Amino acid sequence: MKPQLNPKITLPVLAALAAASCTGAISSNIPVKVAPVALPVAVAQGSIADMEQAVHQQVNQYRAQKGLPPLSLNQTISQQCREHSQNMANGSVPFSHDGFEARVDAIAEEITYGSAAENVAYNYGHADPVRQAVTGWIGSDGHRKNMEGDFDLTGVGIAKNAKGEYYFTQIFIKRR
């Protein structure tokens, strides 16, 4: 039996930050207000691997503030995230959750899961693109729901295109 995916929420964000939250098949447009949040890990525009690690750390710091257990970073999940971010960055797919179910199906070849969710973000022109993306997710109901969800694994993928635009994908998995 195929696991159930939660409803999908896609969120367009104006100019500097665009973000979306996906956990299934229903779409709605919701404006996002970015509120300041204390995130002690700061990463300027550095290596992509360092930035991916910083997303993972900042999300776990946020979860800890809420009394939630940390998410373990998984390379199988991260690879799917990287591929999606790169595809968005090079324009082969739009900034969206297109292909979410295929990404989760690929993950399911190695990880038996009960639920999955995805956050994506896009930004440019920020000294700390990671903080901008994570803060945007925290300020969005759909993203925050995924970040606070009953998941135990995560993966993160970031890609930067020639224009300096950063594309972020984070997938959340709850193993069975």
Image: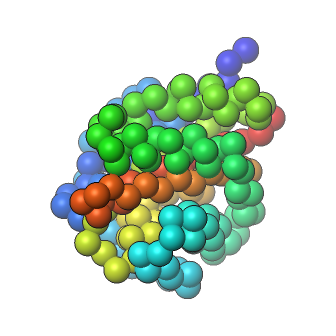
Name the one closer to the observer, 141 or 118.
118
The residue under the point 57% across, 71% down is: 50
Total numbered badges shown on the rendered structure: 0
Name the one closer to the observer, 174 or 66.
174
Residue 135 in sight in this render: no
Q: Position of residue 107 (x, y in %)?
A: 67, 33
The residue under the point 41% across, 36% down is: 97
Quarter of the figure with the C terminus: top right
Quarter of the figure with the N terminus: top right
Q: Is residue 20 left or right of residue 172?
A: left
| In the image, farthest residue toward the left | 15
Quarter residue 61 falls in: bottom right
The residue under the point 61% across, 67% down is: 53
| In the image, farthest residue toward the front | 162
Quarter residue 55 falls in: bottom right
Name the one closer to the observer, 25 or 16.
16
Q: Is residue 173 left or right of residue 127?
A: right
Q: Position of residue 6 (x, y in %)?
A: 54, 33
Q: Position of residue 37 (x, y in %)?
A: 45, 78
Residue 161 in sight in this render: yes
Name the one closer to the observer, 141 or 136.
136
Display coloring: rainbow
| In the image, farthest residue toward the right | 176
* Above or below, comparing residue 130 to residue 145 in the picture: below
Q: Is residue 145 left or right of residue 166?
A: right
Q: Position of residue 67 (x, y in %)?
A: 70, 69
The residue under the point 64% across, 28% down is: 106
